[in-house]
Image (tube, rainbow, N blue to C red):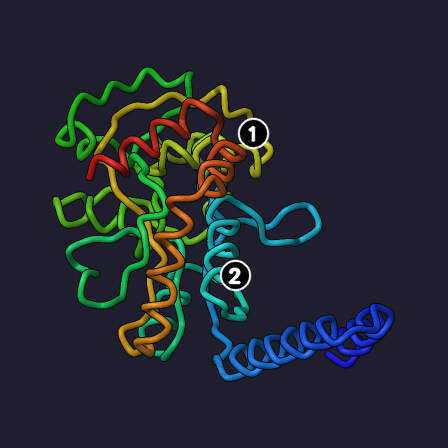
Amino acid sequence: MNKIYATLLVHFKNNNNGGAMTRFYTIVLSLCFSCVTFAQKPSLNFYTEISPPGNYLDESGILVGSSVEMIEELNRLAGYRVKTKVMPWTRAFNTVLKTPNTALFSTSRTSEREQQFHWIGPLLRVKWVLYKHYSSALKINSLEDAKQIHSIAATRNDAKANYLLSLGFNNLDLSEDNVARMRKLYANHNDVILTTNLGVQRLAELAFLDPNELEPALEIKANDIYLAFTKDTDTEIIEAYQKAYRQLFQSAVYYEIIVKWYGEKPAQEIIKSLQSQ
């Protein structure tokens, strides 16, 4: 702040007129008020898992992804400083449930979770899909067929897995390592993997596998994913992020993020599906 003050003072003194100095003091006061407002806002902790391409660590260990970029833009628009922590899904989910002023991304909005969080979004609409290796002769025409297969790789406590469990599935191989799940499919330890249409390709790539060897076996349903704040979150924080979301969704930045990570055609389909609800 002192450097900004000194730079502005030199600039306006060089102009050597009353109008310039008036503008100087106006700018300094505005900066001061902005700094005070920002300082008064609490810093927030957000939690996420490794779930490409929404959120994952790149080769340098930096958290990247489509959801990460959306969240960063929401933080900027809402005016909050945020520290994001990466951990296994169950731990992240339970941490947010019991910790005030924290949030989880990206998470599916389901009837079971509806009253547990304040929901900001949707960020994306995805399809839940069972994928198989192309060499498999397995045919799955319905959920009832899927109940009969030997093993489905799925994420523990994930909305997709919980949905199948609620339908009576007892053949889920549950873990919290998404990359390891993909490797088990290619090694024929599982018949299919339960993931999303937008995440499957990058997940295979992170496992150093060829995504072209995957085929959809059964599309289950579509679902929207959100930024979810714990219920014990200050109202002003929720309102700030709801406003920030409206600004982001109506801006070119949202479309640019979607195109960057998913391509032009999928981006158009995603936005069309969200606008239709």
Q: Is residue 78 above or below residue 64?
A: below
**Residue 193: image location, x then y, percent:** 36, 35
Q: Within 10 angstroms of label 1, few (less than 14), some, or many (20 or more) residues? A: some
Q: Within 10 angstroms of label 2, few (less than 14), some, or many (20 or more) residues? A: some
Q: Residue at x 56, y 33 (%)?
A: 205
**Residue 88: image location, x then y, percent:** 45, 60
The image quarter containing residue 219 is: top left
Residue bearing the label numbered 2 = 76
Q: Is residue 142 left or right of residue 248?
A: left
Give the camera-side residue of 21 and 101: 21
Residue bearing the label numbered 1 = 209
Q: Residue at x 52, y 66 (%)?
A: 85
Sequence order check: which comes first, mark 2 or mark 1?
2
Give the camera-side residue of 180 and 72: 72
Q: Secondary structure at mark 1?
A: loop
Mark 2–mark 1 Cα distance, whole angstroms, equals 36 Å
Mark 2 or 1: the one toward you:
2
**Residue 243: image location, x then y, percent:** 35, 60
Q: Amino acid at mark 1?
A: Leu
Q: Which mark is residue 158?
A: none
Q: Residue at x 47, y 39 (%)?
A: 252
**Residue 258: image location, x then y, percent:** 46, 36
Tag 2 and tag 1, C-beta contact below 8 Å: no
